[in-house]
Amino acid sequence: MAMKSAAKSQLTTEKAHVAMYFSDVSPEPSKSQLRFRVIHFWEARNIAKAGALIGIELLLIDEHV
């Protein structure tokens, strides 16, 4: 399977169709919304302790050239 390379990785908001990068997002949750594509999702559970959740790892990629 061939992978496509992109010069810019753009994120768009639902309200306005303008490119947005992680560095452009306000630290206040009510000020900004960010939609992204999850590249990798890993959920770790402890089998010895009735499947207790140990952690969740998400890999997100933001490229700003």
Image (spheres, rainbow, N blue to C red):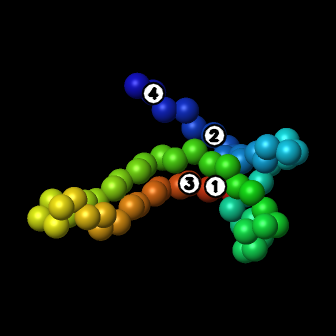
Res 2 label:
4
Residue 60 horizontal side relative to residue 10, left or right: left
Q: Earlier in the sequence, mark 2 or mark 1?
A: 2
Three-letter amino acid code of the residue under disc 2 = Ala
Residue 16, image x, y percentages: 87, 45
At 22% from the left and 59% from the top, the residue drawn is 51
State the separation of the CA atoms marked 3 and 2. 12 Å
State the separation of the CA atoms marked 4 and 2. 13 Å
In this orientation, does residue 22 appear? yes
Three-letter amino acid code of the residue under disc 1 = Glu
Tell me the SS state at disc 1.
loop
In this orientation, does residue 65 appear? no
Tell me the SS state at disc 3.
loop
- Identify residue for label 2: 6
At 55% from the left and 32% from the top, the residue drawn is 4
Res 63 label:
1
Residue 15 horizontal side relative to residue 42, left or right: right
Mark in the foreground, 3 or 2: 3
- Crowdedness near tag 4: few (<14), some (14–19) or many (≥20) residues, C-alpha within 10 Å: few
Do the numbered discs 1 and 4 sit on residues whose CB atoms are within 8 Å? no
Q: Quadrant of residue 45?
A: bottom left
Residue 26 horizontal side relative to residue 7, left or right: right
- Identify residue for label 3: 61
Residue 34, image x, y percentages: 70, 55
21 to 17, vertically: above or below: below
Three-letter amino acid code of the residue under disc 4 = Ala
Do the numbered discs 2 and 1 sit on residues whose CB atoms are within 8 Å? yes
Three-letter amino acid code of the residue under disc 3 = Ile
Tell me the SS state at disc 2.
loop
At 67% from the left and 49% from the top, the residue drawn is 35
Residue 31, image x, y percentages: 82, 67
